[in-house]
Image (cartoon, helix red, strand yellow):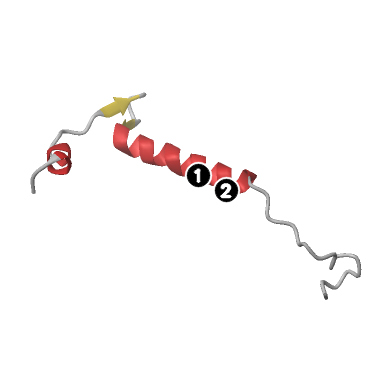
């Protein structure tokens, strides 16, 4: 393989060390943060409301 992808995959990983026990690579940190952002966006977007007024009779029938 040639190109950007193969050159990128051959680089050494960069690690962040916060404590003596916590060490995480930058790429893993980016993936974790993006997953959390997508999760919180999915939680905050409201579900679509029913266009019919089926909740008035309490049974959900149209």
Which quarter of the rendered picture does the C terminus lie within? Answer: bottom right
- Indicate the secondary structure of the residue bearing disc 1: helix
In the visual, does 24 lie left or right of 41? left
Position of 50 relative to 39 (above/below): below
Position of 24 relative to 41 (above/below): above
Residue 25 shows up from this direction: no
> What distance separates the C-alpha of mark 1 from that of mark 2?
6 Å
Q: Position of residue 53 (x, y in %)?
A: 85, 64
Viewer-proximal residue among 57 and 14: 57
Position of 52 relative to 35 (above/below): below
Q: Quadrant of residue 2?
A: top left
Question: Which residue sits at x=41%, y=40%?
Answer: 32
Question: Which residue sits at x=45%, y=44%?
Answer: 35
Residue neighbourhood size for the residue with mark 2, other residues' Cα within 10 Å, grouped as few (<14), some (14–19), many (≥20):
few
Question: Which residue sits at x=36%, y=35%?
Answer: 29
Q: Position of residue 9 (x, y in %)?
A: 16, 41
- Indicate the secondary structure of the residue bearing disc 2: helix
Mark 1–mark 2 CB contact (< 8 Å):
yes
In the visual, does 36 lie left or right of 47? left
> In the orientation shown, which residue stands out farthest toward the left?
2
Question: Which residue sits at x=88%, y=69%?
Answer: 58
Task: Specify the label residue 42 is tagged with.
Answer: 2
Viewer-proximal residue among 13 and 23: 13
In the visual, does 19 lie left or right of 59? left
Q: Label 1 belongs to which residue? A: 38
């Amino acid at each position: 393989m040639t190109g950007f992808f193969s050159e990128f995959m051959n680089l050494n990983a960069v690690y962040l060390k916060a404590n003596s026990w916590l060490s995480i690579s930058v790429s893993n940190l980016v993936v974790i943060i993006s997953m959390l952002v997508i999760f919180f966006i999915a939680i905050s977007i409201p579900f679509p409301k029913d266009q019919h007024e089926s909740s008035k009779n309490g049974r959900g029938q149209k």
